[in-house]
Amino acid sequence: MGIKERKQRLKDETRINILDAALAIGKEEGWQALSMRKIADVIEYTAPVIYEYFANKEALLLELTKKGYCMLSKDMTVARDKHKLPEKQLEAMWLTYWHFAFAEKELYQLMFGIEVNCCVFDNEIPEAEVPATMISDAIRELMGKDASEDEICRRYYTFWSVVHGLISINLVRQGVPDEINKQVLRDAIGGIIRAIKG
């Protein structure tokens, strides 16, 4: 391996270490506690080194948000690909979305601004469109070729509002048994699918 490749590998490893440290701080202390200085302390570098990789805290949070959407998309793709019927794909993807929200709680909170002063990223996150597109494609297939884009969009937002709302309630105020939550989630998903099938 040449010097150039070695330097690039070291840069890539440092970048990963910065992101891993930021995520660890977010998990342990909450996103409000995250600072470039804390990250530098964790990875045993000086704060100016962190700024060589990320212009500011918002840039770092943006990168973690992208990472979260990539992870979610990958998990949803695996769930979708286990099924042929669009109604089964929808159920599998939304259940995977639910599971991701609790398995990766801090990333989910960052991605959707739950208990986080969420930065407005505008259209800086094309990765955020992937899960929505996957769901919309399954809805389109379920509704048939005559479905309008407005109707597909409405059905997507119906799903998302219910699932994300239930997740948000549980992230902020826990106490409802997991089995009840899962049954409410399945009932909601099933009800929306039945309404789409008409």
Image (cartoon, rainbow, N blue to C red):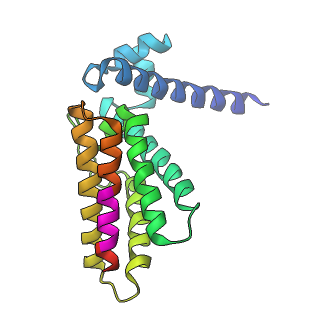
Is 151 positioned to the left or the right of 125 in the image? Answer: left
Q: Is residue 117 above or below residue 142?
A: above
The image quadrant where one finds the N terminus is top right
Is 10 positioned to the left or the right of 144 in the image? Answer: right
The span picked out in magenta is 187-194
On the question of residue 113 being in view, the answer is no
Whether the magenta-drawn stretch holds residue 171 is answered as no
Picture residue at 49% right of the left edge, 10% below the top: 44
Is 1 positioned to the left or the right of 38 in the image? Answer: right
Picture residue at 56% right of the left edge, 54% below the top: 78
> Secondary structure of the magenta portion, mostly?
helix
Q: Is residue 13 above or below residue 87?
A: above
As drawn, the residue found furthest toward the bottom would be: 146
Is 128 positioned to the left or the right of 161 in the image? Answer: right
Picture residue at 42% right of the left edge, 26% below the top: 23
Figure quadrant of residue 133: bottom left
Q: Nearer the viewer, residue 149 or 171?
A: 171
